[in-house]
Amino acid sequence: MGLPAETMQRVDALLSHVWMVRAFLKHSEEAEEDEELCDVHRGLYDYMLALGGPLNAGDAEDYIKQAKKKLRRLRKATELFQEIQPEISEHTNFKMAVHSLTTAVAEITALLDSDSPDALDASSNA
């Protein structure tokens, strides 16, 4: 994407979508009854919590480092939500939450992958 600060700002903007999905899930009646759904919203929260310190400090390099380090947890929570959503509810709100989350996480993943030194080297050699 370019400069670390730009990557940090774009990832943070995408995390606003993740936050809204997390808030929706956390406050849903279904979360009161389903431990896996609770694991999803906790996983989303943990990812964002790990990035809060570097974001508040304006430390883009540490933010990106933490974002990459914790990305597996974010993806795991997203995959779990995709898997269990049909069992939890077929309501449009849940379907759209899955769509919103998977879209945001895919874009976050692409940004973080494109920011890696290997990806930058490959693009400059093309």
Image (cartoon, helix red, strand yellow):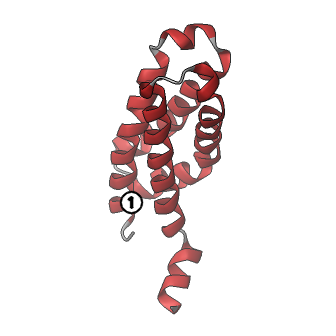
Residue 118, quarter of the rendered image: bottom right
Quick check: 116 left or right of 52?
A: right
Counting labels gives 1
**Mark 1 — residue?**
7
Identify whether 53 is placed above or below 8.
above
Q: Nearer the viewer, residue 22 or 59?
A: 22
Which of the two residues, 113 or 90, is positioned nearer the viewer here?
A: 90
Residue furthest out toward the bottom: 125
Q: Residues within 10 Å of mark 1 (few under 14, many from 20)?
A: many
Q: Is residue 19 left or right of residue 90?
A: left
x and y percentages locating residue 4 in the rendered image: 39, 63
Residue 56 in picture, x, y percent from top left = 35, 40
* Residue beneath the point at 46% across and 61% down: 111
Asked whether 29 or 124 is in front, the reply is: 29
Dot 1 lies on which element?
helix
- Tell me what residue is drawn at x 64 percent, y 47 percent: 72
Give above or below for 79 relative to 19. below
Percent of width and height locating residue 37: 60, 21
Residue name at image x 40 percent, y 55 percent: 60
Which quadrant does the N terminus fall into?
bottom left
Q: Which residue is depicted at the point 48% across and 27% down?
A: 94
In which image quadrant can residue 89 be found? top right
Q: Position of residue 107 (x, y in %)?
A: 45, 55
Q: Which residue type does callout 1 highlight?
A: Thr
With 29 as the anchor, is 38 left or right in this view? right
Q: Is residue 118 above or below residue 77?
A: below
